[in-house]
Image (tube, grey):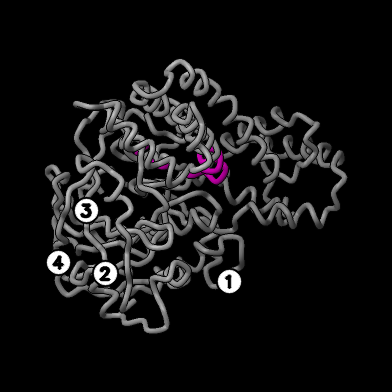
Amino acid sequence: MKNLKLDTYFLENIDKKFYSFVDAQPLKEPKLVNINKNFAKEIKLLDNNFDISRFISFINGDHLAIGSTPYAYAYSGHQFGYAVPNLGDGRALNLGKLNNYYLQTKGNGITPYSRDGDGRAVLRSSIREYLLSEAMYGLNIPTTRALAIISSNTKVYRNYDIEKASIVLRASSSWVRFGSFEFAYYGKNKEKNLKNIADFLIDESYPHLKTLDNKYEELYFEIVDKTIELLALWQSVGFCHGVMNTDNMSAVGLTIDYGPFAFMEEFDQDFICNLSDKEGRYSFANQPFIAQWNLSVLAKVLSPIASEVMMNSYNDTFIGKFKKRYFEIIKNKLGLYNKTIDDTSLILRLFSALKSESIDYNSFFYNISCGKFDFLNTHQIKSWFKLYKKRLALETILEDERLSNMKKINPKYILRNYMLQDAIDKAENGDYTLVNEFLKIAHNPYGEHKEYEHYTKAKTGSEALKCSCSS
């Protein structure tokens, strides 16, 4: 990476009101925790002349790549349903673009958007984001990516304790959020500012819309469709984001801003993973409805340049389309491929049984994809299984092929919160073994990792391992 060059496409095409130039505030005695080598090589961040000290300096902000002009991005948002006009990258620095990915460090210090924060990230939250973003990639769920993580001897205060400061190097094809349009909507020249962001987004991420007369409405429609797909995929593996504020919603349908997230273990539609979410606004069951609500906010702020009636009309179809797509995925997870048969009732009965018997969501699907049914020993599940067997008799696919297909979409491993905590506990004592091993599992959640077989099951009391927004 000696001659690494980043381009400034964003700065050249976005009005200056949307960003601020910021200098990094390097950490003391930085050390490498982990590097995602395959991805780093894929985007040509790393080459055969890899220099670890130079790489650490690059992440830490001691060394700037050619062409890099670090900046923090301004945006607004609705947080827990309430409008907050002035947000932005409070602890993230954008370094520039490399092979279709914007590189960004999180934890480099105070920016103009830090508000009362110190601009730092701690090791535990950095490890969680680093591993989970790659786990979502391994599960084929659209997401931002992670390239590396460093720790340091810089100390920060969190929750009445002193912790190690850390930086994650992350990458995304776009950092444009619903909140980016909200920021453009507030203040003067809203039509001009909205068109600036929308045209930039279309040019970069939706180029097929550029010549359309109604390109802004079509842009909104595509954002709705991408959000539907994202939410269906989240729900299919029990992922709970925890903070689905509009500033945490991607305009290109990615999972962004990993904070108090969790994979649901024992099936419970009312599962809440965020300790700060006292009313359950962002519970597992509410996620699709919140996504639709966030899209209604987006329709409102886009109304100066697009038809609000057309946008809201399209958004009205969200829940119906989401349910259809979610149930399609669940049918595939169950090995039910006959599309002429309506399996809604069978799936709803399964969810009812999983909840009443407190059965682990992902383990259930993995086990039946292995042809294991000995765990189906409770009354409701047994009753459901009889119906399931009758339904399977209507499939024409061979059994071995059916099970093989199911194994490709039913992960053996998800990064459960207690797994991440095990990795954090070791890392805080200087042992990064589990961070490295869990990265391998994250990239291959459908494979065999014999040494870590015990992590395939829920751990008693692990649901209590939750985080808050302040984490």
For label 4, the SS is: loop
For label 2, the SS is: loop
- Which is more toward the observer, 66 or 22? 66
Q: Which residues are magenta?
A: 230-244
User: Does the magenta-highlighted stretch encompass residue 407?
Assistant: no
Residue under numbered circle 1:
450
Residue under numbered circle 2:
65
Residue under numbered circle 3:
71
Q: CA distance from mark 4 to mark 3?
A: 22 Å
User: Does the magenta-highlighted stretch encompass residue 235?
Assistant: yes
- Which is more toward the observer, 462 or 47? 47
**Going 83% across and 53% down the picture, which residue do you hit?**
399
Which of discs 1 and 3 lies nearer the camera? The answer is: 3
Q: CA distance from mark 2 to mark 4?
A: 24 Å
Mark 1 and mark 2 residues within 8 Å of each other at the beta carbon: no
Mark 4 and mark 3 residues within 8 Å of each other at the beta carbon: no
- Which is more toward the observer, 215 or 344? 215
In the visual, does 150 lie left or right of 254?
Answer: left
